[in-house]
Image: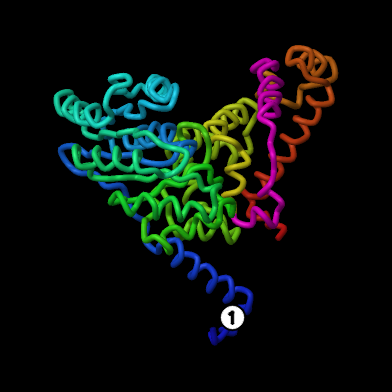
């Protein structure tokens, strides 16, 4: 590209910056927020069968309630797929969000009646879960067009399985020719290069990616930020994403207490147990590790952490008395045998945990003293 390399930089660093800038450009430069209008926002969810549309509707309802303080209503308009209505009702029950349903009647009428119901009951965010097909066909498109013309949604979001790769672009193009799409949601994208071809959606179709589905759990929907995604692809991490995730789930007061104890060198196994429970709220640990800068370099990108390991650690600590948790130094052979028996683990595992905890305390002391150096 003919760019000069400043004396303070290495050619590799300049090259990575060029690639990052191009990636951000490809992914859409600016992030596109959800459309939210007063007094009520109507959202129509569209997509092929198997894309994760119904689950994504539940995730989005949860997100708008939590982030924007909105009162969502889920609408069951997929009257063809077996158990689709039941699936949405189950999600609604899990999330404590009402689901409007009229069974196997006309989807256009259901959507229209649901909007009127929402106005009467004070709902301000209506999410219409429409039917999908295995492929785009005339019958599907006609039904979606009729719903669109009848309820006039503020937002039409297309849910696309990112694992379909380049075909995702064809799916979006097919839907966009018949519907005025306002955005796309990519499901089954774990935040790295998986489904890479699908990331060219904005560049090739001009439809903004608004969200990505990163896990099957109800909190596994993230807003899409082009720069953050570029950072993840280039192994620069996503610390902002990690901070936002932690802010929404972790207890500030508990975190502050733990930090103060670490600084004073008084962090014990009781505090460690509290932190362990806080970390569990963030979801699978391997997903958190991937968000760290240099995750690939450190071999953290493909780490599989068995959730049972966390459960084993918890069982060992819970088998200790409060006095033992606060003073691990008093744990001699007889106490260790009792703890092992109580937790259903071996004495070796108890010893391993205590050793790892001591190593962690040493590392914390280095941080406190300012002597800690990252080994890369």
Q: Could you tell me which residue is drawn at 50 percent across and 44 percent down?
A: 161
Q: Could you tell me which residue is drawn at 40 percent across and 41 percent down?
A: 47
Q: Could you tell me which residue is drawn at 47 percent across and 39 percent down?
A: 134
Residue closest to the eye, 73 or 197: 197
**On-image quarter of the C terminus:** bottom right
In the rendered structure, does residue 313 fall within the stretch colored magenta? yes
Residue closest to the eye, 284 or 90: 90
Magenta residues (range): 293-322
Secondary structure type for disc 1: loop
Answer whether residue 133 is visible to the viewer in this image.
Answer: yes
- The single residue placed furthest to the front in the displayed view is 138
Residue closest to the eye, 232 or 72: 72
Q: Could you tell me which residue is drawn at 24 percent across and 44 percent down?
A: 36
- Give left or right: position of 32 versus 212: left
Q: Position of residue 371 (x, y in %)?
A: 67, 55
- Give left or right: position of 113 versus 60: left
Residue closest to the eye, 70 or 346: 70
Q: Position of residue 358 (x, y in %)?
A: 74, 36
Rendered view: 338 above or below 136: above
- Disc 1 target residue: 8
- Give left or right: position of 235 versus 21: right
Few, some or many C-alpha atoms within 10 Å of disc 1 (few <14, some 14-19, many ≥20)? few
Rendered view: 16 above or below 153: below
Q: Position of residue 53 (x, y in %)?
A: 42, 36
Answer whether residue 98 is visible to the viewer in this image.
Answer: no
Q: Position of residue 172 (x, y in %)?
A: 41, 52
């Amino acid at each position: 590209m003919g760019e000069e390399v400043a004396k303070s930089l290495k050619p590799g660093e300049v090259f990575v910056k060029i690639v990052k800038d191009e990636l951000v450009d490809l992914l859409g430069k600016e992030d596109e927020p959800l459309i939210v209008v007063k007094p009520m926002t109507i959202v129509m969810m569209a997509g092929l069968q198997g894309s994760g549309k119904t689950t994504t509707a539940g995730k989005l309802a949860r997100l708008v309630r939590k982030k924007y303080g909105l009162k969502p209503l889920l609408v069951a308009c997929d009257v063809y797929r077996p158990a689709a209505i039941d699936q949405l009702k189950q999600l609604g029950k899990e999330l404590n969000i009402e689901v409007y349903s009229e069974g196997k009647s006309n989807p256009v009428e259901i959507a229209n009646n649901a909007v009127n119901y929402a106005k009467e009951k004070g709902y301000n965010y209506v999410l219409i879960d429409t039917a999908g097909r295995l492929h785009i066909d005339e019958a599907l498109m006609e039904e979606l067009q009729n719903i669109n013309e009848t309820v006039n949604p503020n937002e039409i979001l297309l849910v696309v399985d990112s694992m379909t790769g380049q075909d995702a672009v064809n799916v979006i193009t097919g839907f966009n020719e018949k519907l005025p799409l306002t955005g796309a949601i990519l499901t089954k994208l774990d935040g790295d290069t998986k489904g890479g071809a699908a990331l060219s959606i904005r560049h090739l179709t001009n439809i903004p990616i608004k969200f990505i589905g990163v896990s099957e759990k109800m909190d596994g929907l993230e807003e899409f930020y082009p720069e953050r995604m570029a950072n993840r692809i280039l192994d620069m991490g996503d610390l902002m994403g990690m901070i936002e995730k932690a802010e929404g789930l972790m207890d500030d007061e508990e975190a502050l207490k733990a930090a103060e104890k670490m600084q004073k060198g008084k962090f014990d196994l009781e505090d460690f147990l509290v932190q362990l429970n806080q970390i569990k709220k963030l979801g699978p640990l391997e997903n958190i590790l991937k968000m760290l800068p240099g995750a690939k370099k450190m071999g953290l990108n493909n780490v599989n952490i068995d959730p049972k390991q966390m459960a084993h650690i918890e069982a060992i600590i819970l088998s200790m008395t409060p006095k033992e948790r606060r003073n691990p130094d008093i744990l001699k052979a007889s106490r260790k045998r009792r703890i092992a028996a109580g937790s259903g683990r071996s004495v070796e595992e108890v010893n391993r945990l205590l050793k790892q905890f001591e190593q962690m305390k040493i590392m914390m002391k280095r941080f406190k003293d300012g002597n800690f150096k990252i080994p890369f």
